[in-house]
Image (tube, helix red, strand yellow):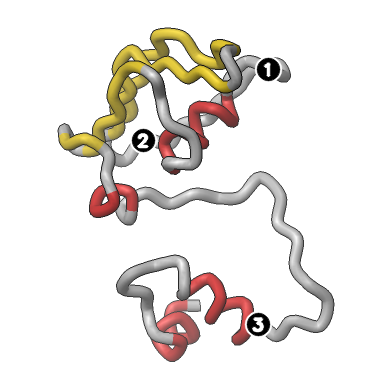
Amino acid sequence: MLKLENLSVRVNRKNLLSSVNIEVGAGEVVALCGENGAGKSTIVSAIAGIIHPVNGRILLAGKPLGEKTKSEIGFMFQQAEFMDNVKVKEMLCLLQSFYRSPYSFNELVRLS
């Protein structure tokens, strides 16, 4: 379960989120919908640890979000751009480098 409690984010003295509360149960899939500037990307950035809240908490399975718990969350990029002439194996190796205990290349091939 992922829970945001009274999450507030401020960047350059501008309030981007104010007291946001969201609860996502185990196995649920959630889509954040809203107009531009509603805070969708800010919420995802806070969960990913890219920006830090000035107030509130982010909990995963009841525990504060930290390095260990962040590895249990998966994200899909909004836009993906790849360099020209990059081989699939090279891209997989790059993505593996983002994780502490990634699948081996052979395991990834077997899973596909």
The residue shown at (25%, 32%) is 59
Asked whether disc 3 touches disc 2, contact meaning CB atoms under 8 Å apart, the reply is no
Q: Position of residue 71 (x, y in %)?
A: 33, 55
Mark 1: few/some/many CA within 10 Å (<14, 14-19, 20+): few
Mark found first going from the N terminus, 2 or 1: 2
Asked whether disc 2 touches disc 1, contact meaning CB atoms under 8 Å apart, the reply is no
The residue shown at (57%, 25%) is 40
Q: Which residue is mark 3?
A: 88
Decide which of 58, 108 is in the foreground and name it.
58
Q: Position of residue 96 (x, y in %)?
A: 46, 74
> Is 28 left or right of 34, judged from the image as shown?
left
Q: Position of residue 6 (x, y in %)?
A: 33, 12
Q: State the SS at label 1.
A: loop
- Above/below status of 86 relative to 60: below
- Above/below status of 40 relative to 19: below
* Picture mark count: 3
- Above/below status of 85 relative to 68: below
> Is 68 left or right of 36, judged from the image as shown?
left
Quadrant in which the N terminus appears:
top left
Q: Amino acid at mark 1?
A: Gly
Q: State the SS at label 2.
A: loop
The residue shown at (39%, 67%) is 99
Q: Which residue is mark 1?
A: 37
Q: Quadrant of residue 21?
A: top left
- Above/below status of 90 relative to 100: below
> Is 88 left or right of 26, judged from the image as shown?
right
Asked whether disc 3 touches disc 1, contact meaning CB atoms under 8 Å apart, the reply is no
Q: Which residue is mark 2?
A: 28
Residue most extreme to the right: 84
